[in-house]
Amino acid sequence: MPAPSVMSNLKLPVKANDTVRDERAGGHAGGPPVDSSKLSTFRGVVVPTLEFMWSVILFARFGYIVGESGVVCTILMTLGCAALVTVTLTSISAIATNEIPTGGIYSILTRSLGSGIGSAISVLYFFGITVFIGLEIVGSVQAVLVSTKFSLSGSAMVDQNALSVLSLLVVFGIAMAGPRVVHGIELLFLGILMLSFASIFAGFFAAPRGYDFNGHITGLSLKTLIENLHPEGGADLIQSLSFILPCFVGIFSGTNNAVHLKNPSESIPKGGFLSVGTSLFIRLEEMDGPFILSAIAYPTPGLASVGVFLVGIGSALQFMVISTKLLHSLAAISTGDNDPLPNLLRRVGANKLSSGDHQPRTGIIITTILALPFVLLPNLEVLGTLVTMCCLLCYGTTNFACFLL
C-alpha cells in the first residue's frame, strides 16, 4: 500500500456554515462544484496568475538588475524567489485541497490564525496589493513614454501623472463592468502579450538591427554573455531582490477565484504550479530593459511597447479585483462594536454587493481612491520595496500557519 501523502494527512475542521457557503458557491461539501458555467483551471487560475506575475518590472527594471547584479546572481535570485513562492504555493494547495471554504485568502488566514491575526495580515496584504496597483501603472506608463518618446505637454512629470491617472480610470472602468468582462479582457490582454513576447524572442535572433545603442546591442554573443556574468562593483542585491520578488506574488489569484472555479481543489494547485513554472522560464529568458526590448522587437518595435503597457494594465486589473474582494471580506467580519476597522468599512458600504451581479462595487471605488496617491508617485524603487515587505510578511505567516497545522 502506498504511503499517505502529507497533503492528505492535513485535515482541518470544517464548520457547518462553511459547508453552506460551499454549496452556495455552486458545489457541495466534499466535492467539486457542478456548475458548468464556472471557470476552468486555465481561465480561472492560470490566466489571472500569469497576468499577476508578469509584472511591468520584468520590462522596466530587469535590464538594470542584470547589468548591476550580473547574469549569475540574477539567475540565482530569480530561482530563490521562485522557490520561496513555490513553498507558499504548496501551503495554499494543502489548505485548498482540504475543503477550506471558498472565501479567498482572507478565509485561509482567519481559519489558520484566528480572526484577529488573520484580519491584521489581510489588511497588510490589501495594502500591498493597493501599492502594487500604483507600481504597475506607473511602471507601464514610464516604460511606454521612454521607449516611444511620446509627449503630451512637453513635461515628463505632467505626462507621467496624466497618463497614470487615465490608466487607473481604465482599470476602474473594467473592474466595474463585472467578472465576465474582466475575464474576457484578461484573455485579450494575454493574447496580445504573448505576441509581444514572440516579437522579443524573434528580435534576439534578428539583432542587431536598426539603432544598436552605440554598439551595445550585439545580438546573441557568447562574448557579451561572459562580460555580463558577474556583478558590477557596489551592486545593491537587496534592491534587486525587491524588484524580482514582486514578479512572483500572484499565487493567491487562484484562491481568490475559488468561488468561480469548477473544481477549486484541483485547479488551484495545478494552475498555480504551472503559472510559477511558466513565469520562471520567461524571467530566465527575458533579461533586458524597456529600451532594449523596444529596439530589438521584430518585426516592429511597436509590439514591445504595447506589451509593456498591457502587462501593467492587466496586472493592475488583477490587483483591483483581488483587493476589492478582500476589502469586502474584511467589512463583513462580525467582531462586535469594539473593532473600528470593520465598522468603518461597513459605514462606507464596503460590505454591500450590487443587486444585479453581486459585485463589491463600493470596494472598487474605495480601492481606486486609495491607489491614487501611489499612482502619482513615480519612484518604482520605493513602491517595489513596500510591496516586497508586505508580501514577505503575508507569505511567511501563511507558511508558518500551515506548518503548525
Image (cartoon, rainbow, N blue to C red):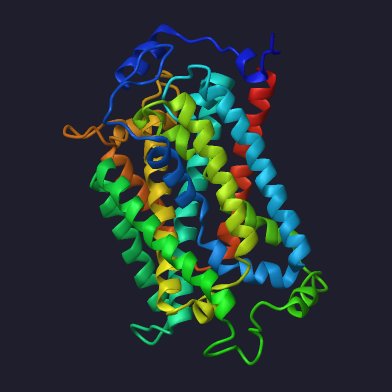
Q: Nearest the camera: 345 or 12?
A: 12
Residue 343 in percent (x, y) is at 37, 28
Direction from residue 253 to residue 65 in the image, left or right = right
Q: Residue at x 58, y 58 (%)?
A: 282
Q: Position of residue 366 (x, y in %)?
A: 34, 45
Camera-nearest residue between 123 and 216? 216
- Give residue 161's quadrant in the image: bottom left
Tell me the quarter of the image containing the C terminus: top right
In this view, the residue in front, 280 or 346, is 280
Q: Nearer the viewer, residue 5 or 257?
A: 5
- Whether residue 277 appears in this view of the structure is yes
Residue farthest left in this picture: 356
**Residue at point 38%, 67% (across, down):** 164
The image position of residue 213, as x and y in percent, is 60, 88
* Residue 338 in the image: above or below residue 370: above
Q: Quadrant of residue 289?
A: bottom right
Residue 366 versus residue 260 in the image, above or below: below
* Image vertical order of residue 144 relative to residue 389, above or below: below
User: Outermost residue, bottom direction?
Assistant: 214
The N terminus: image quadrant: top right
| The quarter of the displayed image where residue 207 is located | bottom right
Residue beneath the point at 53% across and 45% down = 275
Q: Is residue 387 visible?
A: no
Residue 30 location in percent, x, y? Answer: 44, 12
